[in-house]
Amino acid sequence: MDAKILCLAVLSRGPASGYEIKKRLEQPPHALFQDTSFGSIYPALRRLAEEGAVSAEPLVEDRRPAKKIFSLTPLGRERLIAALGQPPQPDRLRSDFLFTLLYGDLLPPPLLLSIIDARIAELEGKLAWMEDCEPSITSPSGAFLHGLGLAYYRSCLDYLRQNRPRLAAELQGPVQEPHDRAAE
Amino acid sequence: MDAKILCLAVLSRGPASGYEIKKRLEQPPHALFQDTSFGSIYPALRRLAEEGAVSAEPLVEDRRPAKKIFSLTPLGRERLIAALGQPPQPDRLRSDFLFTLLYGDLLPPPLLLSIIDARIAELEGKLAWMEDCEPSITSPSGAFLHGLGLAYYRSCLDYLRQNRPRLAAELQGPVQEPHDRAAE
DNA sequence: AGCATATATATCGATCCGATATAAGATTCG
DNA sequence: CGAATCTTATATCGGATCGATATATATGCT
């Protein structure tokens, strides 16, 4: 799913400007699994308009920055549905947090633990954010997705909270040779 | 974490060629949360060598393609640790599957359900793959990460298996008026 | 008045990704 | 035996993407 399909999908929920498309992608549920930048959106919209997949209508509201409202055309709708029907590409996750865990033995234990604590706080915020958007769910598959997102956040939080103490203990006392350890 | 840091991290576990770095990144636990291509690895290694963060040693084994073995220098190790100590960037997930769910109301129900079934099968494979690599864990934080990965896969699988029947029912019979619900 | 923030479009450079070119040894299999 | 294919190995290209920045105007705050 490249930036073009992302734009078509957001527009399938209603006309929007490039700026509004970006805003919608920053909020749940999109924010959970898709992201893109202005540097991708504006070129994508321009090409989609050239290809006839969206129609652009310049809108000059009084005393506001001029914007272009893009709408999905029947051709664009076809392209969207065709893309959605393809077997999905495998997920691609890029997580600095998990990466840091993997090489955590290179860091001082207190720093590593503080990074985990920050992660827990961040996940709590994300979870609350997702729980808040419950009323906006309409379609069955949207509700299914919402439940899956909640299950994901909750299981990660549970794991981090339950296993942090054990990790802290293991990092503090790397008990390999238990003889003569008065200093520690 | 750009391609340079990825290379430094892999090399911190031992010298390797560019090709071997790619192979290691394709296997668990790296494959869970990082990925990159030759098009990123080779330029990154060249620049790291120029900057003195890795040392390159050409190795011509008899009757094999010539390769360069890269090793981490003390400078490279410093850079790696400095990068790991930074507050991690937020995760970035790109998931066509979740995206398809969000717009699932645009697809014929049987197609959507078959996509979910394929996902379940894929997750089962990934989970088995991760369970297999248990013996290779050494550090406490590595074990912590491994457990987190298992918890993630298991919770996703549980959710999909438990909620698929309900979604199938909702898609088949879009019962909007809740009077007369003998079937359910 | 001054400053920060929000709305809005657009582009640039650096990076990144997927495909491809090149090449030689290893494996497979009729 | 030979042909096809796979694995190892390096490298680059074009297109896509990302993060930062430029440009403007309107709003809100103190």
Image (spheres, coloured by chain):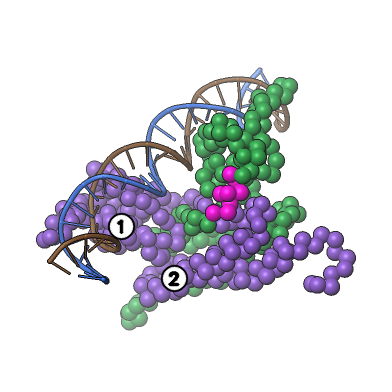
Chain colours: A green, B purple, C blue, D brown
Q: Considering only order in the chain, which callout, 2 or 1, is on the residue closer to the N terminus? A: 1
The numbered disc on residue B130 is 2
Give coordinates of residue A46: x percent, y percent. Answer: 55, 31
Q: Which residue is mark 1?
A: B21
Give the CA distance from mark 1 to mark 2: 19 Å
Q: Quadrant of residue A149?
A: bottom right
Give coordinates of residue B134: x percent, y percent. Answer: 41, 74
Left or right: residue A35 versus residue A69 is left
- Residue at 66 percent of width and 52 percent of height: B106
Left or right: residue D11 versus residue B151 is left
- Residue at 64 percent of width and 47 percent of height: A27
**Residue bounds of the magenta highlight:** A79-86
Circle 2 residues within 10 Å: few <14, some 14–19, many ≥20: many
Q: Chain of mark 2?
A: B
Considering only vertical position in the picture, is B70 above or below A155?
above
Q: Chain of mark 1?
A: B
Considering only vertical position in the picture, is A3 above or below B168?
above
Give coordinates of residue A45: x percent, y percent. Answer: 57, 34
Residue sitting farthest toward the right: B179
The residue closer to the viewer here, B41 or B64, is: B64
Give coordinates of residue B127: x percent, y percent. Answer: 48, 71
Q: Amino acid at mark 1?
A: Ile
Q: Quadrant of residue B119?
A: bottom right
In the rendered image, residue A182 lying in the magenta stretch gets the answer no
